[in-house]
Image (cartoon, rainbow, N blue to C red):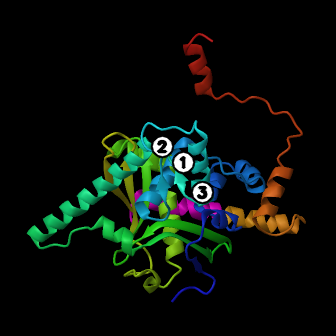
Amino acid sequence: MTHTDAVAYEDMPDSEYFALPSLDQSQLKQFLHSPYDWAWNRLHPHHETTDAMRFGTAFHAYLLGTGTVVALPEGETFRSKKNQQWRDEQLEQGNIVVSADELAMCRRMRENLEASSNLSITQGEETGTPGRDFIRMIEEGAREQAFEWTDRTSGLRLKGKADLIPQGVDYLVDVKTCQSVDPVPFAKACLNHGYHIQSEFYRMGVSQFDPQLFGRNRRRASGMEFWCFEKTDAARWQPYVIESDSPAAELARKSIRQGLNTLSVMVADAQDAGYGEGYDAAAAMILNEDHPTTTKPVEFTDWMLREAMSIGF
């Protein structure tokens, strides 16, 4: 059964998802890195969009079929009023406008995924084992699925938006665009960007729901697959997985629990101190108390001094 306070939202736009006051995995990672940065951004929300983020959003929509991605014909620009008007009309309709080169890369990435599906199905027929039809997984799964739940240990309200919850398998899927799909660069990216925390956070969220809601076999996912697509001319792709019993997943669970428990105490302290209730109150308390009144001496360790001496300072 689904926990009574867990809610799954159907076709929720990003704007409505971001407006939910609950805490998502990105905010939790920011809190773990710096409570002060988290507090500032919590009270001054802004969603900066880089070129990499913009292309990632476009490719997600193109691959998952959750939005319409369009571009001018190759060689044309937005210098003419006609093309500017076309762009404005597309944006008004909610479509995603990219360059002709970016749309071509989206196509190559999806074509490579389709090729892997066809190869896997053919190999499965030859060996008598089921192949992996990645395209069918997308078409039949829950895409861009938003949900909320309450963490029973800390009492905090949390939220997530999974790229893909496939039917009939035990894992979740997140789509990534990256500079390289080779193992070492992607492993570094996982730790640098906290993909292991994302994996465990979403496993927590999806486990709050009856597996039948998403056509799943079990309540708690076995892990999260990351379908990594390389932003190169060849547009290579490679699926990776962080299993729930891996050291990275164990590290993530400890970090998540530490962060949620600490934040829960801050929320309670903020209420006791008269700041109000919820995350915003905790953020206000953190910022209000982060004003130094004394000067601290610079503390040099022995190895710092030895390093300075070795380079002649």
**Residue sitting farthest toward the bottom:** 1
Q: Please state the extent of the stretch shown in magenta in the rendering.
A: 243-260
Report the residue marked by disc 3.
26
Closer to the chain start, of discs 2 and 1, is 1
Closer to the chain start, of discs 1 and 3, is 3
Please state which amino acid type lies under the numbered disc 3: Ser
| Front position in the image: 136 or 280 | 136
The percent position of residue 262, horizontal first and vertical second, equals 69, 62
**Location of residue 128 by image quarter:** bottom left
| Front position in the image: 236 or 310 | 236
Residue 29 appears anywhere in the view: no
Closer to the chain start, of discs 3 and 2, is 3
Please state which amino acid type lies under the numbered disc 1: Met
Q: In percent of the image, x 61 and y 87: which residue is there?
A: 4
Spatial CA span between label 3 and label 2: 28 Å
**Location of residue 118 by image quarter:** bottom left
| Front position in the image: 24 or 151 | 24
**Location of residue 132 by image quarter:** bottom left
Q: Which-is-in-front pick, marks 1 and 3? A: 1
Helix, strand or loop for the magenta stretch, by majority: helix
Q: Residues within 10 Å of mark 2 (few under 14, many from 20)?
A: some
Spatial CA span between label 2 and label 1: 14 Å
Query: Does the magenta run of residues contain 215?
Result: no
Label 1, secondary structure: give it. Answer: helix
Picture disc at residue 53? 1
Q: In percent of the image, x 62 and y 51: which residue is there?
A: 88
